[in-house]
Amino acid sequence: MNASPPPGWYPDNAGSGQRYWDGRQWTEQTIPAQSPAAPAAGGTASPRSEAPGSVVGWVLRHKVVSGVAAFVVVVGLAGAVSGGEDEPANAADETPAAVSDNGGSDDVPAADSEPVDTDGDGTADEDDFRPEDPAIQTEDDLDSDNDGVRDGDDLRPNDPKVQTEDDIDTDGDGVADYRDAFPKDPTYSKDADGDRVADQMDAFPQDARYSQDSDGDRHADAADAFPADPSRWKVTLAMENALSSANDYLSFSSFSRQGLIDQLSSAYADGYSVEDATWAVGQLSVDWKQQAVLSAKDYLSFSSFSRQGLIDQLSSRYGSQFTVEEAVYAVNKIGL
């Protein structure tokens, strides 16, 4: 068991000076650091060496000791000296620890601080997008245009008139743009077959291949051989034969457009119907002015004509039936 240190001045753990130990407890007597203590009878000395009950003083006053006792005292003295300014080791065993400024042990850690939540919305400021606004914790909680819809759910967060696709109607026809085939034309909105022709204007709204039916015969113009004639719409065998005959006539003689139709439809010639003959001639790629030049040369090859007489012969309904314009062109071309 350790013996209590002898009375004396020791470093004060509760202050910057020294406190007096009376052999049983710490007293209220303190002195500043490095302050000289009251001098002993023998002269001036430090508080540790001359204070009543100091270790050095005790050894000096008890010179006569046994060898063993002297050894123990010397060892104790060495231990006290090696401690320097620290409190004696056995003082902590029998005396209370010096009181620190904060009223407790210096080893007790400070309690963790609570996270700050300025707006009281349950989200710590460090995680809060707007720590002073309880309605907003994240960026998605913003409502930039104040339309009652959060930016994260708003199609156009800066336009108070638009929250979803249904709110966008460019032409104001009551049909949202994403459902309007013609979003910039209030007249039309539907195009069921996607052919860019409004259903109201599409003769075949369910068929993207066709849209026009000029003669209303329920046959699209693109597939109607007679888009202006509701009585027929496809090419017959008779029509094909009339076209073949027209090409044959032009291969050995010159004809005006009307003269060739008459030749094909005449009861004294081919006898095709006027409709079939007209269709056949319409399929030809012919320069009728050049045909007039050929006819003018034929007439002059077997007879003589004045300029006006040849024009009349070429344009007469009893002659070649070219137009007057075609006849004049031909006469000019041959130099008459």
Image (cartoon, rainbow, N blue to C red):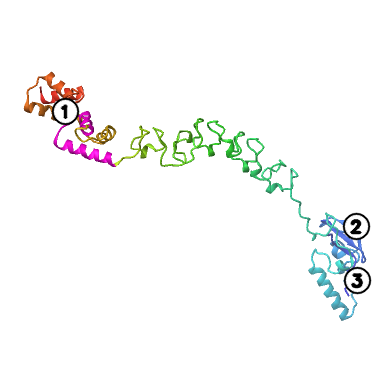
- Reply above or below: 290 against 100: above
Determine the image quadrant of residue 248. top left
Instruction: State the CA–CA distance, disc 3 to disc 2.
Output: 24 Å
Q: Nearer the viewer, mark 3 or mark 1?
A: 1
Start and end of the magenta stretch?
Answer: 237-265
Identify the mark nearer the N-term, 3 or 1.
3
Q: Quadrant of the C terminus?
A: top left
Amino acid tagged 2: Gln
Left or right: 140 in relation to 117: left
Left or right: 168 in relation to 4: left
Image position, residue 95 (x, y; %): 89, 65
Residue 61 tag number: 3
Nearest to the observer: residue 266 or residue 131:
266
Identify the mark nearer the N-term, 3 or 2.
2
**Mark 1 — residue?**
292
Amino acid tagged 3: Arg
- Reply above or below: 20 against 75: above
Image position, residue 6 (x, y; %): 90, 68
Determine the secondary structure under disc 2: strand
Determine the secondary structure under disc 1: helix
Q: Which residue appears at 89% of the width and 80% of the height?
A: 66
Main secondary structure of the magenta stretch: helix
Q: Nearer the viewer, mark 3 or mark 2?
A: 2
Amino acid tagged 1: Ala
Residue 29 tag number: 2
Determine the image quadrant of residue 204. top left
- Reply above or below: 47 against 151: below
Disc 2 packing (10 Å; few <14; some 14–19; many ≥20): few
